[in-house]
Amino acid sequence: MAVGVPDDGARWTAEWVQAVAPDEAALKAARKLATPQSWSATACDGRGVWGDCQGSGKHPYQVIVDFTGPAYKCSCPSRKFPCKHALALLLLWAEGTVGSGSPSTAARQWLDSRLERAERARAGGESQPRHADGPADPAAVRRRAEQREARVAAGMRELERWLLDQVRDGLSSAAHAGYAHWDGMAARLVDAQAPGAAGMVRRMGTVPAGGPEWPGRLLETYARAWLLARGYAHVDAVDPALAATLRARVGFTVSREEVLRAGTSVRDRWLVVGSRDETDVDGLTVRRAWLRGAATGRAALVLSFAMAGQPLDGSLVPGTAVDADLAFYPAALELRALVAKTHDVQTAAEPSYAATREVPAEYAEALASDPWLEAWPVVIGPVTPAAADRGWHLVDDADCCLPLVTGEHWRLAAVSGGRRVTVGGEWSPSGLRPLTVWTADRMVRL
Amino acid sequence: MKEWEDLVSTALLGTAKRDVPDAMTMASRPLADAGVRHAEPAGRLLDQAAVLTTYRRAGRLPRTGLVVGEPAPPETKPRVSRAAARRLQLLLDDRPGLLPEWLALCAEAGARVPEELLPDLFDRARVSRAIARRLAPVAGERGHWLAAQNPEWHQVLDHAATTVETLEPEVWETGRRADRVAYLAALRGSEPAAARELLAASWATEDPGDRVEFAAVLTDGLSADDETFLENALDDRRKEVRELAQVLLGRIPGSGYATRMRQRLRRCIEIKPDGVLRQRPRLEVRPPLEVDRAMRRDGIPAKPPARLGEDPPSTWLRELVARSPLSTWTELTGLPPEQTIELHIGPHEDAVRSGWWAAAVRQENQAWAAALVTTWRPGSTRQPGPLLEVLEPDRRRTITARMLADYPADEAAITWIAGCSGPWDNRLGRTVLRSISELRRHRPYALSGVRAVLAERLPIALVGDLEVLAEQRTDAMTATLDKVADDIRFRHEMAQEIASTARPPKTPPMEFT
């Protein structure tokens, strides 16, 4: 941050706002907008300021500024950063015309997710050598770690109590409660520095709107959170691998150096089964590359991250195989991994595949080690995609049919042409999400 | 799973109101084995739910009994080169305007599109005739196989491919609207009368909002036999249906609608010998004095739209001319269209000319469209585009080139460049470039509006001429023309990639076994 940030608690002056404006025109436009008439639902707290700005369109723009960073978010299409709406909001606030209040749902979600990421980054950076300001005081590092442990433990105990309350009072009251019902608990878990558990709770909020049979699905998510909270209560007593899984699910991160130093290292010819990108509301894209070892049969997941505008790691190309050492993150079910060392360049690979009926069995075994597991990489064949009354399936020669995830799979159908193919993808209880397909003469990404 | 359902219904109500079911077997045994028993009922329910949730997630079994349909027949054409396939994906994502050209080049090369892009292409083709028409020859066996499986794509490839034989008649009774339209269109292609009768039989019970889509099927294969049906549609509750019926009836020579219009028009126009020498006749035009009920039924509005600021008789005259058979005029004057429109008209000239322009478009009359569009002069408020669309491509290009040669530097040259749809031949392309060179000197800013048009329609062979043009001067347009040249080079690469597609191998590719 080039212009520097005022100390916590100190209000920005108009000069500060001027300093963060991308150009003179944006500042001029912002001054025009910095009148209370253009704004509604404005408020601020110690973390940020937010409000709705009535622009020329039908819907007002939702504007949020996070003082740490600082960072800006606005629903307007402007490419200027910060945009005139964010600047105008800051000007209003600098003038003291914005009262304090509790954040809107959107503001809190965004501010929380930024905090979560900051935590992640901090945790990831903890083990990195400190330059410039000298070596960290080991006692201070230990003290901070202990503080966090205590906070997380308290947060997970609160989650346990909260879940008991939900089930005692009945799920039916949740149906009409709206996202705020879960967001409150999720925010407390963020405060408790347990971002993994927070994300689990926040996702619960989408279940009641997700169609019929939501009570069953909601109870499932509660049960899994309960299992995590109860397990975490015994984290010091269980097997270290299970403890590592519990800590990872709760939201502790393990540094790259630690994984390379202590993680299981496996050399194999790793087939890149497929990869999938997901971008969250803040523009952070997560790329999941799924691998299977040709000799060991092991599954692996390599994650990479990029902010909007940054390129993603493209080194693991679906359909190719790479001879490499993978270092696995410590866990009861070793799945997430880092590419520690590449021995040979990637080559197009003929996939070795499992039979359709082996997939659920393999997944059940994985769940036994990590009951919070979602997706699992599989390559199956030879199978033919078919659309049926109850959704798409992959059918093998023995009439064994695996469901594909809800949605249309015309691309896969087009590539197969009603003939047998090999399919790579993510298997989960909601079905197979196909990512890659091999035909007799080529490989196609889906 | 009953055990799970009991848990869910208890959780839904709340353990404060309902006892936690205790006779658990699957869930309680492992808990008992581990010595876990939570002090609170809610905790016991969550413990059991945690066990059962894991069982349920792990226990999904494959189902059986699914029928796999017939596979697609083997292909006879090669798939385009990998580079061409990548470019096609890029066009689908970012430059859909170039899709028709890509598809045409692909057809020329005797190749087919990569299978995985068929779904995206079908979705594009559903909303663009230009794409649908060119997709059919390059979709391959796979394309036809795939289109047959998705009702939304049935009619995409072409009407000829969807024959009545490939469709089940029940579709008309029970199918969704898109399927029913496809069925009706297919039937119309082979048995026009049967299609009309089928539609007439259910017309009264069809949803008023769907009727216009069904009736539009009659546009192809229109004949005098359709008149009775369409005449009835003139009284439909929906304006869109009434307007469609008016247009279609106007295209049936000798229809009651055309005859009524002709008679009304004849009452308003006369041909008189002109001048002392009596060599050149003139048209004498008197607008209708009122609009009666019958005229309103035939689509002539009682009140002109206020925005036009016209007096009602002028509107009535214009609408009457637009809806009357153009042959009314040539029969009256005994002259071909290009001479008829040269005649002196008098005070109502503007309404008559506007009516003719509209009539040529409504009636898709090539001779009149060609005659009228060449009378266009700078400053005219009438746009050449719609008339050019009526013309055959060759005629469209020839006329546009002639007009651009006549008025190269006028701002209105832009309306011709934009109005003449692609593809352009080299001759038209060169005329356009000359016009641009002139415009650049006099009205440089008019050009920025046609950048995309130039990039998509200028023939690839002219990229050298364009580069020379860009280098001639350094001005506001240099960058624009460079950008157009870039775009055309993009198309050039596109053409080369497609042309580099390998010929089919001598031995068929091995099948997956």
Image: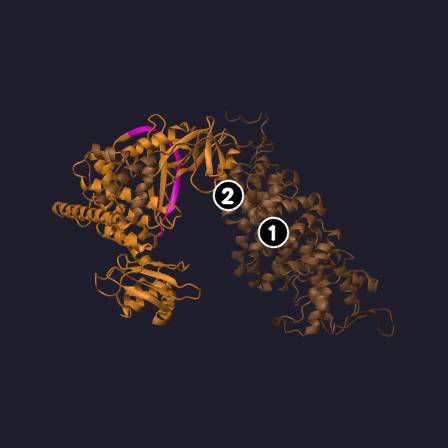
Chain colours: A orange, B brown
**Residue A101 at what x, y percent from top left?**
26, 64
Please give the name of the residue rendered at 33% of the width and 54% of the height, measured from the top-left corner. Answer: A179
Q: Which residue is mark 2?
A: B89
Image coordinates for residue A28, horizontal then vertical, percent: 37, 68
Are discs 2 and 1 both within one chain?
Answer: yes
Residue A388 in the image: state x and y as whole percent. 49, 37
**Residue type at tag 1:** Arg
Q: Tell me how far mark 2 sits from mark 1, CA to CA.
A: 20 Å
Q: Which mark is residue B457?
A: 1
Q: Chain of mark 2?
A: B
Q: Quadrant of the N terminus of chain B?
A: top left
Task: Specify which label sits upstream in the sequence, 2 or 1.
Answer: 2
Query: Magenta stretch: dominant SS?
Result: strand
- Quarter-of-image position of residue B143: top right
The reply to whether residue A343 is visible in this rendering is no
Tell me: residue B210, above or below residue A60: above
* Residue A116 in view: yes
| Kind of residue at badge 2 | Gln
The boundaries of the magenta stretch are A266-281
Q: Which mark is residue A148?
A: none
Q: Nearer the viewer, residue B243 or B1?
A: B1
Q: Is residue B287 above or below residue A304?
A: below
Q: Are marks 2 and 1 in contact (CB under 8 Å)?
A: no
Asked whether residue A280 is drawn in magenta, I would say: yes
Marks 2, 1: nearer the viewer:
2
Q: Residue placed farthest to the left in the image?
A: A139
| Position of residue A280 in the picture relative to residue B435 (left or right) | left
